[in-house]
Image: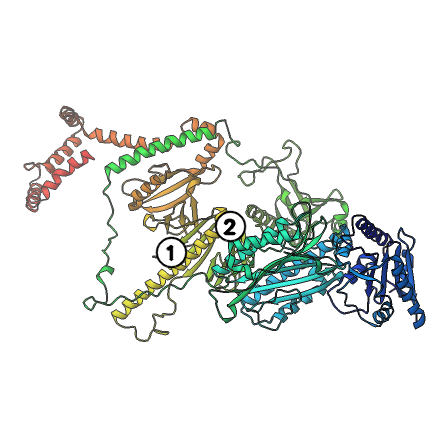
Amino acid sequence: MAEIKIDKNLFQERLSHFVAAWKADKRSGDALFNGATSILVLMGKTEETAQFQKNNAIHFWLLGYEFPATLFLLTLDGLYIVTTAKKAKHLEPLKGGKIPLHVLVRGKDAEANEKLFVDITAHIKAAGKKVGILPKDTSSGPFIDEWKKVYSDISKDVEEVDISTALSSAALAVKDENELRAMRNASKACIALMNPYFVEEMSNVLDEEKKVKHSALANKVDSKLDDSKFWTSVELPSKQKMPSDFDAAQLDWTHGPIIQSGGKFDLKMNAQVDDELLHPGVIIASMGLRYKSYCSLIARTYLVDPNKSQESNYKLLLQVHNLVMKEIRDGANVKDIYSKALQLVRTKKPELEKHFLKNVGAGIGIETRDTTLILNAKSNRILKDGMTLCVTTGFNDIENPNPQDKKSKVYSMVLSDTVRVSPSEPIVFTGDAPSDLDATSFFFKDDEEPEPTPKKAKKDSTVGAVATKNITKTKLRAERSTNVDEGAEARRREHQKELAAKKQEEGLARFAEATGDQNGAAVKKFKRFESYKRDNQFPPRVRDLAIVMDQKNSTVVLPIMGRPVPFHIQTIKNASKSDEGEFSFLRINFLSPGQGVGRKDDQPFEDASAHFVRSLTFRSHDGDRLQDIANQIGNMKKDAVKREQEKKEMEDVVEQDKLIEIRNRRPAVMDNVFIRPAMDGKRVPGKVEIHQNGLRYQSPLNTQHRVDILFSNVKHLFFQPCQHELIVIIHVHLKDPILIGKKKAKDVQFYREATDIQFDETGNRKRKYRYGDEEEFEAEQEERRRRADLDRQFKAFAEKIAEAGKNENVDVDVPFRELGFNGVPFRSSVFCQPSTDCLVQLTEPPFMVITLEDIEIAHLERVQFGLKNFDMVFVFKDFHRPPYHINTIPVESLENVKEWLDSVNIPFSEGPLNLNWPTIMKTVTADTHQFFVDGGWSFLQTETDDEDAEEESEESAFEMSDSELAASDESSDEDSEFDSNASADASEDGSDDGESEGEDWDELEKKAKRKDRESGMQSEDDEKPKKKRKH
């Protein structure tokens, strides 16, 4: 009792307030206090119960403590307290207020104690004939028995009246700020235990299909009450922590935790938790906590794999609950609130009226349930600002039309929240614990229904093991599509001219003013390097005035003129050691202006006209030490360059937001998938889960081995079926790279191998009797079926990803294989496939994903007669981005590539040579505005037109008139005898009766011509010059 400290000011203030309300009621007609002239409050022996009555509540309200074996008699003239000496010691300091306080001390003398009670009865008689009592008071014990014995003598002379409602209205119902703060803390504690703790425990039990009793789960929640670490670390659903002044030692249970499921439900507050197993169906959890004597209650209903009827009924319960909340305000009549709630049930679902609870809550505070303030159809209480209520709505014992099992035939639903009445809408203290359908519904059954097994087609006995439809036409390597639709070609050229003109206009509009970045080169910035901020940071060894290598600060400390001078490794170019006679020399070269011969060495200086130390030379007899220093400087330089490169490489890696996991149901999962780029460690398949704001890949080896991808960072999502491939793929192309292990990745791929590994062609496993053609054909059919099933699974999962990420505009894109072509974007030849938004290669790493919207123009290189391959270059709208090359595309794909580029509105040009694109882009970025003023990308098309013109001029050179031809022959005859002879030889080749000087040769020539005429080759020789002229 020594620790008891009663607040005198609060005691006097509350006592005065209560007596003032009593006097006001007397003046207005005794409506509230029923004309009571004195009020008697008895407290017997202490009872181990969490439920407080009005007598307990008055003690806590006035004193802050409960005083057992104590009598309070309150009259309009003062307060009389009969108690023991120990308790009286704490009550004496309360004297001296506006309302007189009389403390009557009991002792061990029975006669003296009886006389005290007789004095109290005298004061009751003196005050008046009506004494206010608490009819439901259940106090007991020797103290109460003694009082009753004395009181029975005057009981016939006085009239007892019920003052329960008066105590509630004038004292307990309306709370002050300190009381409200305690209730808010109690409510936050209820929220923390309900959600996240209970919800996570319950979902884990259901997810892992464990068999756990209600009582065991309740004990787990109960144990958290004394776990101080839990209260300091728990995060509420609103992402807040518990208040800094929260004292977990002040918490105590008022009831619960009560967990019910499996068809047996009791929605009363005094329900008991049983030992039945937690049943996945309708689960009700309720609990009440007391903080500094003030209570808060919360109850939630959780639906596991609910059917449509259960979801509909829960939605109605939410509507009723929200309606009650909306109607609670200062001045509202309690019975009107209940009537409106009941009317909503009758209107929406009249069959549920008989299941609706008989009240929608009660007052709450020091008492767990204020029986004078019950929200039902009979109560006439008027709500006041500052009152606190526990709003409880529910349906009891509803029949389930589609029960999952025997325990699901009947179910109940309830929602409870602790609220404060205000002039407008109520303040919901427990509102942070979500109660909407999405947050309280859990789905653990697979969403996908098992697909019906396709019936095997009847085998036609007339068809052999190898079906004719499986025999494809032989495609020879030399076959090439040479036929070009002239009409389509003309239309394409016209469309390309329009695209080129449009691109030119866009360029002029984008770069309306002169722009440039100093000849297209990125402006290098002067970097400052600081080795030490203060002298005391130097290594201790510098006192020896020797060369000191400080690896930690990447610095070389050199002794100059008797002083240690630090040089950061980034200021040193290199170091070398040489021998001359008996001395060895260490030469350290520094970076200075004018000495750089390459781009890498050319770096800016703050003041290039200042004096620079270009090199320092040190002499020593110890050649080995100088060699060691030179090696250390070289290694330190390499490490510094490596660090700079790593830092530069990781510049664009972003730190993603935290993945919000789905807690109220099992997330959509695809198991047995591999990830690329691969994670560290053994290559084993993991699982991909779809959560609220992203994807998670989880390795089975280690819970820390996981990759989170947020939908907000997804630029493209692809699904590539396993048709003509060995794997089926879901590919995610990111906006910004992320770290996987220690490497950055902008493309993350989930795949499964489509080959059937269980069939070993060597006959080692599961081969058995597969020998004939028919069996091989069946195996092929099985392979096709399995591949189709894989495609179906992955496509469905990709669509689920797109559905979950629709708020971030995530959509599934599928490559068009029929538009694909082979090419070499990196080192090996791969199959590139266009999709709706991209050009992709997803089969072999490194992957290629080019967004079509980012492309400015395309240029086809090495397009000339006689070459088997050509190259394609994409120039991006961001001119600082290097052009992208796809090399060695077979020339038979040329028409298809052109047609595809034209269909996606990408302007393209073609030329016979490979261009120097770094130089071109340097020119473009130097002054982009001037580049477009000078014609922009038309120079690529002009080059093509010039080639066409040259070809035309070459063709026209062959088309000479007969007179010119004759003149040319005469001039050639006159010019040279050699030319004449050559012409004669040529004419002999083309005529039948040519002559020659040598007979032997003439005879041979005639024989050859005769054979040619006989074999029909003469006509072909005649036609060849004509073809040349036309070409």
Tell me which colouring the rendered structure shows. rainbow
The percent coordinates of residue 806 (x first, y second) are: 48, 48
Amino acid type indicated by mark 1? Pro
Residue occupying image coordinates x 47% and y 36%: 879
**Few, some or many residues within 10 Å of mark 1 (<14, 14–19, 20+):** many
Q: Which residue is mark 2?
A: 711
Q: x, y percentage for residue 659?
A: 56, 54
Instruction: Report the label total.
Output: 2
* 430 to the left or right of 464: right
**Is any atom of residue 18 visible in this view?**
yes
Location of residue 696 in the rendering, given as x and y in whole percent from the top left corner: 52, 57
Q: Which residue is mark 1?
A: 721
Q: Residues within 10 Å of mark 2 (few under 14, many from 20)?
A: many
Tag 2: amino acid: Phe
Question: Distance between the Cα atoms at labels 1 and 2?
Answer: 22 Å
Q: N-terminal of the two: label 1 or label 2?
A: 2
Is residue 519 left or right of 978 when viewed as pictured? right
Asked if residue 1009 lies left or right of residue 408, the reply is left
Position of residue 426 relative to residue 354, above or below, is: above
